[in-house]
Amino acid sequence: MKIVIGADHAGYRLKDEIVPFLESLGHTVKDVGCSCDQSVDYPDYALPVCDQVVSGEAERGILICGTGIGMSIAANKVNGIRCALVHDLFSAKATREHNDTNVLAMGERVIGPGVAQEIIRVWLDTPFSGGERHLGRINKVMKLEAGV
Ligand code: RB5
């Protein structure tokens, strides 16, 4: 799978551990930064990740900041993005099955690399359930973008 990943200064250490993990699973990873402690603004990294998912350049996106909250808020402003902030395995599976999320947000200040890797593994491996109920709800959410 082609995966694009980005982080701010509070999330880049976790990102830098996740990149080789994803590659070890056989995925192709595009890292949009950042790569150091210098303070940056999370929307500046959420946008290029989301743009690449919407354009189809990448199939999924992963965003990391201190809490994951700022990244998830920013990502969900982008048309076509369904981003879930996930810090547990149950939610990682449920958000793929029920919400068909295409971007995953996590917080480096909230979880460690071991939990993050398991969340990613489950999130990438779980297919959308495809059920009518869930599809109908997703379509209603996507209509909110169009202001319908
Ligand atoms: C940066 O200090 C922090 O506010 C940011 O990484 C994120 O947690 C925002 O939601």
Image (spheres, rainbow, N blue to C red):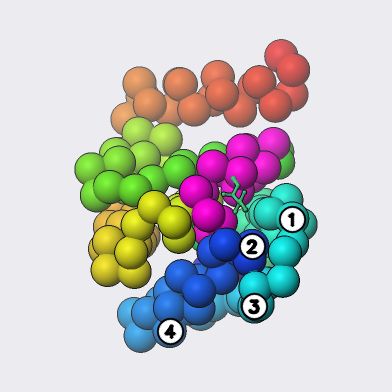
Q: Are marks 2 and 1 in contact (CB under 8 Å)?
A: yes
Q: Which residue is mark 1?
A: 41
Could you say where residue 4 lies in the image, as x and y percent from the top left?
A: 58, 67
Q: What span is in magenta?
A: 63-77
For the residue labelled by badge 2, is the local secondary structure a helix, a strand or a loop?
A: loop
Could you say where residue 18 lies in the image, as x and y percent from the top left?
A: 43, 74
**Label 4 crowd (10 A; few <14 / some 14-19 / many >=20):** few
Q: Which label number is shown at residue 8? A: 2
**Mark in the foreground, 4 or 1:** 1
Could you say where residue 142 lies in the image, as x and y percent from the top left?
A: 61, 28
Residue 70 in magenta? yes
Q: Amino acid at mark 2?
A: Asp
Q: Which residue is mark 4?
A: 20
What quarter of the picture does the C terminus occupy?
top right
Could you say where residue 145 lies in the image, as x and y percent from the top left?
A: 70, 26
Q: Which label number is shown at residue 35? A: 3
Q: Of callouts 3 and 4, which one flags the residue occurring earlier in the amino acid sequence?
A: 4
Gap between marks 4 and 1 measured at Cα: 24 Å
For the residue labelled by badge 1, is the local secondary structure a helix, a strand or a loop?
A: loop
**Mark in the foreground, 3 or 4:** 3
Q: Of callouts 2 and 1, which one flags the residue occurring earlier in the amino acid sequence?
A: 2
Q: Amino acid at mark 4?
A: Pro
Q: Is residue 117 above or below residue 30?
A: above
Q: Amino acid at mark 1?
A: Asp
